[in-house]
Image (spheres, grey):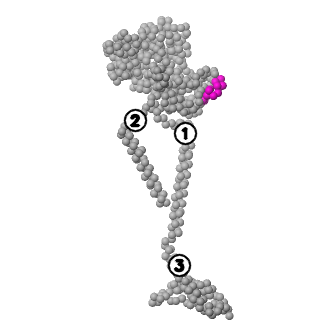
Amino acid sequence: MKKENTPEREELQGGALPETEIEELAGEPAENGVRPAASVPAPAGELSGGESAAEAPEADEDAAAGADGNIDQAAGEDAGEKQEKPVKPKKEKGKRDTRKLRYGGMATALTAVVIVVIVLVNVVANILNERFPINLDLTADKLFTLSDESKEIARGIDKDVEVVLFLEESELENASTDGTGAIFKQLHELLELYDSYSGGKVKTTYVDLNSDPSLSLRYEEYDISSYYDVLFLCGDRYQKANITDMFTYDETSYYYYGSIDVQSSSVEQSLASSLMMVTSDVTPEVLLLTGHEEDSSTIEGLQSILEVNNYSVTELNTTGSEDYSEDAVMAIIAAPAKDYSDAEIEALRSWLDNDGKRGRQLMVFVNYAADCPNLYEYLSVEYGLEVTDNLVQETDANRVMSYQAFYTYADMGDSEYLSDLSGRLVLAPTTRQLLMNAGTNSDNSLYNTSLFTFPESAKLIAMADALGDGEDEGQEGQEGQEAAEPFDADEYPVVGGAMATSWGYDADNNRIETNVIVLGSHLLANQYFTSMSTVYNEEFLLAVANGVTGNETLVNISTKPLEQTSLEFTSGQANIFFIIFVAAIPVALLIVCLVIFLRRRRL
């Protein structure tokens, strides 16, 4: 008879005891150290009627062994769960993975933010640099940077200007920074800066006539004759310059050795002047009076200064039949060696008077070795400025150039036009003393004002004693100086340059003036001295000229010396740089890197 399989029997057949019995056995205490044996399984005959009696013992043994094994396994698993539960290794590992993910995500996000910020800063910097250029100019005199005066000129340009250069841009852009290469490089850099500061009003065009000669027809009307010509175009106005005129060089070195030793640069001057002239509605006209063996170096120096500062300079030979220009605002007599005739003095007087309307100016440079009695009498009688026969000699070694007593430094005078140069010095070689006889009371219709003076350390020497028998400047500086007997002036300071002002009122009750300027040293305008950075000859001449002519030029732009300078350090400075850049900074970087490395290892 086949017995029904109950759940208990099925569990036994599967080799396992019921859970209740396992729990009872596991939980029942042992008596005398012996745990009670498990219940013996039913005989094999009860499990299956078809099984032989011979197989029953083996089935019983297998069942018993299986039951014992299952009991031990269940007990072991239960005990293991109870022991491992407090450790929870899988959960702790999950926490670590989450923390790594969190820190890694933060690092990635921070890196992305930094990259975005860098890109934005770069974009903004490029935009700002186009509008407000930022250049690092390490040259001593800022050759490749626009001065504040030039920036004002650029910002004030409200007309479109085209600057045409007749060469390839690469010749300027890739030029060296030595000699003439520095001039080319400076020209290229400053033109780009003018473009930026003018808001795009000043554009540069490079025309290579060698590669395309037909382009010369486009500029034929401007008489382009040189490879280095520079053309400034603005509407109907134009101005032409040449790169070779934008610097001074040692002519002796060029004559003997054929090398161009550049001494100073006037690139910024030339650009500013030409831009002002083509964009200005009015350009003051100045007459350079010739015909009396004027000093050529004085004329060249004056032309160089005035033309690059918005003046139109025209020469007029007073010995001919040509009349004075009615449009000119100032005439200049540049150190004549021969005197003016009575007729020439009368023509000059008539032009200055301007039919009683005044408003015209005269500047006279005195040749220290020349005698011009008619001219000097006119200046003394009509304007109170007397040119004496005395030369100024300085006894203070700190106020002379190269130990030459007649190459003296002078102080700025009392003129209001020189207020911005107060405390500066001019170099006034071989100056003839002036006397101001009209008085200094500005309420008078005629009064005098000093322009440059010498202190009590200056002495006077009679012209005859100073020059002796020598006819040239070299003898005067050697033989004449030794034989001369210096003496004190009757009044100090000694005046070397002065201005007479004659004024009145026009029909509309407006004050009108005529100014006559007399400068006892014609070498004031020599290019060698005007290009020196230690004195203010050029600024002095421009301040006076701008003041009396009413020139609306907003700035005075001077030349820049082009000297090769070396960067030198003392031993103490060298040690400081060594400590900072060789020791301190590298060690600091190593520490920072180590800290970051250790912190990241713990993540």
Q: What type is the residue that disc 1 sits on?
A: Leu
- Inspect the magenta stretch and tell me whether residue 212 lies in it: yes
Where residue 323 appears, as percent x and y from the top left, is 55, 10
Q: Earlier along the polypeptide chain: callout 3 or callout 1?
A: 3
Whether residue 152 is visible = no
Q: Nearer the viewer, residue 251 or 80?
A: 251
- Total numbered labels placed on residues in the image: 3
Q: Residue at x 65, y 23 (%)?
A: 217
**Cα distance in 3D space between marks 3 and 1:** 75 Å
Q: What type is the residue that disc 2 sits on?
A: Glu
**Which mark is on residue 128?**
1
Q: Which is closer to the viewer, label 2 or label 3?
A: 2
Where residue 187 appears, as percent x and y from the top left, is 53, 29
Please give left or right for residue 238 compared with residue 456 in the image.
Answer: right
Residue that mark 3 sits on: 77
Residue that mark 2 sits on: 568
Q: Is residue 598 above or below residue 146?
A: below
Q: Earlier along the polypeptide chain: callout 1 or callout 2?
A: 1
Q: Is residue 448 above or below residue 534?
A: above
Point out the image quarter for the N terminus.
bottom right
Determine whether the residue tagged by mark 1 lies in a helix, strand or loop: helix
Where residue 519 appears, as percent x and y from the top left, is 43, 16
**In the displayed image of the protein, which residue is found farthest to the right?**
1
Where residue 259 appears, as percent x and y from the top left, is 48, 24
Q: Which residues are magenta?
A: 204-217
Query: Which quarter of the picture shows residue 455?
Result: top left
Q: What type is the residue that disc 3 sits on?
A: Glu
Determine whether the residue tagged by mark 3 lies in a helix, strand or loop: helix
Q: Nearer the viewer, residue 114 or 453?
A: 114
